[in-house]
Amino acid sequence: MSTIAMGHAGTEAAPAEKKGLWSWITTVDHKRIGILYGVTAFLFFLIGGLEALLIRWQLGAPDKTFLSPEAYNQLFTMHGTTMIFLGVMPLSAMFFNYFIPLQIGARDVAFPRLNAYSYWVFLFGGLVLNASFLFNAAPDMGWFAYANLTSKQFSPGLNVDFWIIGLQILGIASLAAAVNFFVTIINLRAPGMKMMRMPMFVWMSLITQVLLLLAFPIITVALVLLMLDRNFGTHFFVPSGGGDPVLWQHLFWLFGHPEVYILILPAFGVVSEILPVFSRKPLFGYAAMVFSGCFIAFLGFGVWSHHMFSTGMGPMADTVFSLGTMLIAIPTGVKIFNWIGTVWGGSIQYKTPMYFALGFVAMFIIGGLSGVMHASPPADLQQTDSYFIVAHFHYVLFGGSIFALTAGAYYWFPKMTGRMLSESLGKVHFWLMFLGFNLTFAPMHILGLNGMPRRVYTYSAGMGFEFWNAIETAGSLVLGFSFLVFIWNILRSLKAGEVAPADPWHGATLEWSIPSPPQEWNFAVEPTVDGRDPLWEERRAKGGTLPEPERVSGAGIHLPSPSYWPIVTAFGTAMTLVGFLMHVTLWVILAGLAITMLGIFSWAFEPADH
Amino acid sequence: MALRTPSLRRVARWVPALCVALAMLVLAGCSPDGYPQTTLAPKADFAELLDKVFRRSFQLATIVFFLVEGALVWALFRFRGKPGDAEPEQTHGNAMLEVVWTVIPAVILVFIAIPTIQTIFKTAEAPTDNPLVIEVTGHQWWWEFRYPEYNLVTAGDMHVPVGRTVDLRMTTGDVVHSFWTPQLAGKRDVFPKRDNRLWFRTETAGLYPGQCAEFCGTQHARMAFQVVAQEPAEFDAWRTGLAAVGAPADSGAPAPDSLVAQGQQLFAMKGCVGCHMVTAVGAPTMVGPNLAGIGSRTMIASGWLPNTDENLARWIMNPQAVKVGVLMPNLGLNDEEATALVAYLRSLRVAPAPAAVATTAAGN
C-alpha cells in the first residue's frame, strides 16, 4: 500500500470535536451512525431475547399457565419479527455503516444524510412496532402473517395493523440504506481497489444490498395489499371475495427467502474477515467465495416455495423447488470448505473473535445439513411447522448470524472504541453461549421429529415432550446469562479496558491502518491499494512491523455538516404511515406528509457549511 | 494432536467418555418410544414413504456431519499457533481441491434427489383401490370428519378401517390449518374453497394422535384430534352405532324424570342445540362440532382433554376457562344442570366403545 495526498490542502480550521446529545441527533458521520445502529439494535435484540426467555419458561413443562395463549402468540410473533428486523438486520447495518467506508478507504458513505435518515426511520419503526405492547395489541399472527387469519374477520384488533405499519416503516429504512451502501461500494473505493480486491465483508455486504433492493419491494407491495384488504374492503387474500390466501404465501416467501440470505450473508462476510487474520493466512479460494455468494443470492430468489411444500402445489412444482433448494447446498458447501481451507495449514491464534467465528462454522454446518434434509418435500411434509424447523433456522440464524456478528463485535470493538475487550471474559462468554445455544436448540431436532409442532403455547403431558423441553428451558437461561457476561465485558472495557492500538490483531484490511477509534475523517490521506490484503503486503514490504499511525489535526479536511433534517424527515415519514395504522386518520397522514416535505426541501437546500 | 497444557490434557481424557454419554443420551432421545406423535415410527404406507426419504437424507447428512466437523476440529488442534511461529505458507486456494468439493456434494445430492422425486410423484397419485373417502374440514379450533359413503359426520375422533386406503378431501371452514397425523402421513394444509388431498392406509389398529400444524389463532395449540384405526368389523360396528345415536329407533326415549332426560331438556333450553347436532346421519355443518357419539369419544375440547365426566362438566360450565377464545359461550350452568347435561352427553355414545378407546379413556 502506498499513500497519496488527499485533495485540497487547506486553510480551513481543524474540525471541532463533537460532543453531547445534539451532536448524536444531527450526526451524519457513518461511524457514529454505525454506533447508533449497534446500540439500538442490541437493545432490541435484548428485548427479543427476553421474549424468547418468556416463551421458553412457558414451554418448560406441559400444560403451564404462566402465559395466556394470547400473550404467548404475541410473544412468539414479536420474538421473530424483532430478531429479524430489529436485531440481526440492524446489527449487520452497524457493521455496514462502520466498516464498509473504512474497508474501502472512503471518508464516509455516498449519502451521509440519507444514512442518518435510514437510522432514524429504523428507530421509529422499531418503536412503533413495540408500542403495540402498550395497547395490548402486539402482533399475534406469526412473523409470516399467513392470510386469511390476518383478515379483519379473524383478526379484528390493531395487532396486524401494527405489524404492517411497523414493517413498512422499517422497509423504508432498509431500502434507503441499501441504495446508500450499494452506491458507496460501487463509487467510493480507494484507488486500486478493484472489485476482486475488495475485502470479503464488503463483497458479502454488496450482495446483501442487492438482495435488499430486490426483496423489500415485494414485501412492501404485499403489505399494501394486506392493508387494503383490512381497511379498504379489497379481497386480495380474502377467499369469500375471490381472493387467495396462497397468494400471500407466495408473495411473503418471495421476500422471505431472500430475507434469510440478507440475514446470513453479512455473517459470511464477517467470518471471512476473521478466519484469515487469526490463521495468519489469506482467505482460501477468494474468487470461489465471491461467486458462491452471488450464486446463493441468485438462487435465493428461486426457491421460495420450499416453505410451502405442505400446501399441495402439485408434484411438478414440488420437484422444481426441491431441486433448486438442494442446489443451494453446493455453493454453501463451497463456503464451508473454503473456511476450513483457510484455517488449514495456518497458525491459529485463539483470540475471542476466532472462537466465535469457528463456533459459527461448526454450528452453521449443522443448520446447513438439516436444511438439505427438508429441501426434500417428502421429508419436509413431516418436518415443516415442527420443532425440527425451529432447530434448523436457529442453527442458521443464531449459530450462524449471531455467532458471526458476536465474532465481529469482538473483532472490531477495539477499532470502534479504542479499548480492548477482556479476553478471559470473552472466552467465558463464548463457552456459555456455545453450551447454552446447543442445550436450547439441539433437542428441538428430537422434539420436532417426534411430533412437536411449532407455535404452540403449550403441549399436553403424555406426549413425551416434557424432558427435552425442560432441558431447552434450562439451556435458554444459560444462553441468556452469557449475554450478561458480554454486556459486563463491554461496560468494563469502556470504563477501564486496555487501550487498543491501531492494529491489535495484525489485520489485513485498511481499517487497521488508522488510529483506534478512527478520527472523523477516517483517512488523513487517501490510501491506494495494490492487492487483496493491503496491510499485510505493506507490512511485508516494510520488514514486519508498521509504525503506530499518528492522530492528525484534520485541518483542511472537508466533511459533511451535521444536519437535523434527516431526523425531521424520518419523523414525518413514520408519522405518515402511523396515520394509516390508526384506522386511517387523515390529519395524521397529511401532517406527516407535510413534515416529510418540509424535511426533504430543507435538506435539499441546506447550505453545505453553516 | 498435540495438546500442550496439562489442563487441556486432563480435559481431553474425558472427551471419549463424554462423547459416548452424549451419543447415548441423544440416541435415547431419538427413540420414538414414548412419543405417541412421532414421525419416526410410521404406521401407514404414506408415512413410510416419507420416512424412507428422511432416513436416506439423515444417513448421508450424518456422514457428512462427522467428516466435515471432524476435519474442522482436527484442523483446530493440528494448526494451533505457537508464539514465535513463522508465518504459515500463504496459500490462496487450490483449483483442483475446490472442484472436488464442489462436485462431491453435488453427487451426494443426487442420491437424495432421486428418491425425493420418486416419492413426490408416488405420493401425488390419487388412490384407485376403492378408497374410503373422508371429507376433513378444519375449524377454529376443531376438526370435522364427514363420511359420504355412509352419510355420517363426526368430529374429534376420525375412525378409519385398517387395510383400506383412506382418501382425504380437505378444506377449512375459516382460516388455514394443517392436518397432521405424524404416524400415518405428512402434513397437508387446508385452504378455504380448495380441495386438498391426502391418503394413507394403515394395517395396524390403534390410536394415532394428530394436531393442527399451521398457526391458526389463539388456540392453535389445542386443535388436536385422534385417528382411531379399527379392524373392519369394529369399524362397521362403530359407524352403524354412530348412525343410531339420537335416532328415534334408538332404544327408546330416556325415562321422563331421569338425569339424562333432564339433560336432554337443558340441551334444548340452554341453547346448545343452536350450535350442535346430536345425530350424525346427514347432519349439516354447524358452528360447533357434531355431538353424536360424544359420550364415547376419546377426548373433548378438540382432541386434548380426556373425556371424563369431571372434564366434561368443567368444559360446559366454563368453556373460556378451559380453552380461552373458543366460540362456546358461558351458559351459566349450575352444578345440577351440569351433572344432568353430562349424563345426557354421556348417553350420546356409540356402544360398545371400541377396545382401544376404552383403554385410553380409562388410562387417562
Image: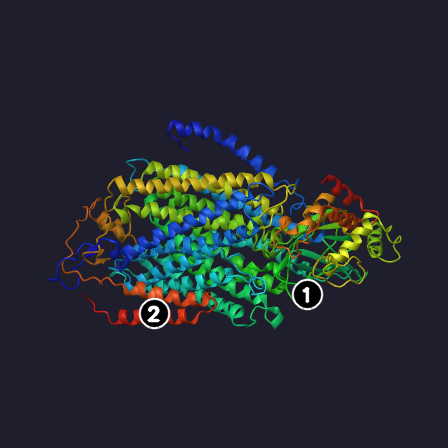
Which one is in front, A267 or B279?
B279
Question: The numbered mark 2 sits on a residue in which chain?
Answer: A
Residue B306 visible (yes or no): no
Residue A348, given in percent of the width and then of the height, sits at: 35, 40
Q: Residues within 10 Å of mark 1 (few under 14, many from 20)?
A: some
Q: Residue furthest left?
A: A11
Which one is in front, B94 or A500?
A500
Which one is in front, A229 or A559?
A229
Against B187, residue B63 (above or below) is: above
Residue topped by disc 1:
B195
Q: State the SS at label 2.
A: helix
Question: The numbered mark 1 sits on a residue in which chain?
Answer: B
The answer to whether mark 2 and mark 1 are in CB contact below 8 A is no
Residue topped by disc 2:
A596
Q: Residues within 10 Å of mark 2 (few under 14, many from 20)?
A: many
Residue B39, given in percent of the width and then of the height, sits at: 64, 48
